Amino acid sequence: MAPSQPQFVTITMAERLLFVAAVPSDWGLTAEQFQTVLERSVAKRFSCAGSKSFPDSQAVEKYLSTLHASDLALACACSAGNNAAWEYFVATYRSQLHSAACAIAGESSGHELADSLYGELFGLRESQGIRRSLFDYFHGRSKLGTWLHAILAQRHVDEFRRTRKTDSLDDTEGDDADGIAHKLTDRSGSPDPERHRYLAMMQAAVEKALEALEPRDRLRMAYYYVEELTLLEIGKLLGEHEATASRKIERTRQEVRRIVETALRDEKKLSDAQLRQCYQYAREEWPFDLTRALSAED
């Protein structure tokens, strides 16, 4: 039998954060329920960090202090099906969710997008007889409103990709055999056996770098690269000036590149020439799905 995972969060920690969150008594949220949610958040945080060892108590305490405890408690109570918590959630977030959905998908589709999200949040789907709520994937690292906006953007992109799937297949009909073969060869005309390996390494490094971003930075990148919103539109959604959005996107882009290059040099032991080759292949053939890499699970 595999050893059980050590308990990172104590009941005392959970009780303390519940006090900080000022959870109303009619939400019926217990310290044991909140402890489970906190454990899940800690496990997600430190698994994303790529740590091979369990975090020490000081690291856990420091991480817990950064969480948006009130938002996490609300998500936990809603996931448990508490009516009072749901009423508070709807009263607080319904208007801004519909406004954000209309900004993302347009007036005609925005309300449908927002309404479909409510179904996922409530947990209409069941797995092995258990109602599963989308709230279970909120870990409190960002504000709940930021996370919900990112989920809306994700769902809109998923639907866009689904409806464009047939068009994408039709786009390949004009490619002849020579054109397809050219995509898989280097400049000399000979197949390069390193291409797929280099692309796989680049993809893994990019995904790891994006996963390590702060939730708001990841959301900003998703709006810009996946949703293809303008800087002005991004600024309005995030409550910041478009110049600020531009500056932060550039800063994040540089940080992602630094992390990627460090990983390829230090972990994969690539030379500068090999690194340039990785970038060349990525420019010629970008097979990575940024939609998933920039998803909003938080």
Image (cartoon, grey):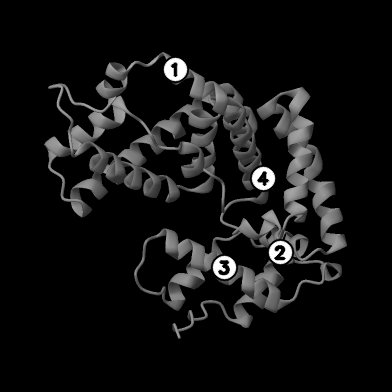
Residue 76, label in figure: 2
Q: Provide the residue designation for mark 3.
A: 40
Spatial CA span between label 4 and label 3: 19 Å
Q: Residue at x 31, y 39 (%)?
A: 257
Specify the amino acid type for callout 1. Answer: Glu
Question: Looking at the picture, how far across and down is residue 152, in whole percent?
Answer: 66, 39
Relative vertical location of residue 138 with respect to residue 199 in this rendering, above or below: below
Tags 3 and 2 touching, CB below 8 Å: no
Would you name the residue on which mark 4 appears? 148
The residue located at (34%, 47%) in the rendering is: 204
Residue at image position (44%, 65%) is: 46
Return the mark for residue 202.
none
Q: Give the secondary structure at mark 2.
A: helix
Q: Secondary structure at mark 4?
A: helix
Left or right: where does residue 89 sit relative to residue 224? right
Q: Look at label 3 and name its amino acid.
A: Arg
> Would you say 100 lies left or right of 179 here?
right
Q: Which residue is mark 1?
A: 173
Q: Position of residue 60 (x, y in %)?
A: 48, 71
Instruction: Give the answer, above or below, for where 34 lies relative to 176.
Output: below
Q: Residue type at mark 2? A: Cys
For label 1, count other residues whose C-alpha is less than 10 Å away and answer few (under 14), some (14-19) or many (20+).
few
Observer-nearest of 17 and 181? 181
Q: Secondary structure at mark 1?
A: helix
Query: Mark 3 vs mark 2: which is more N-terminal?
Result: 3
Residue type at numbered disc 4: Leu
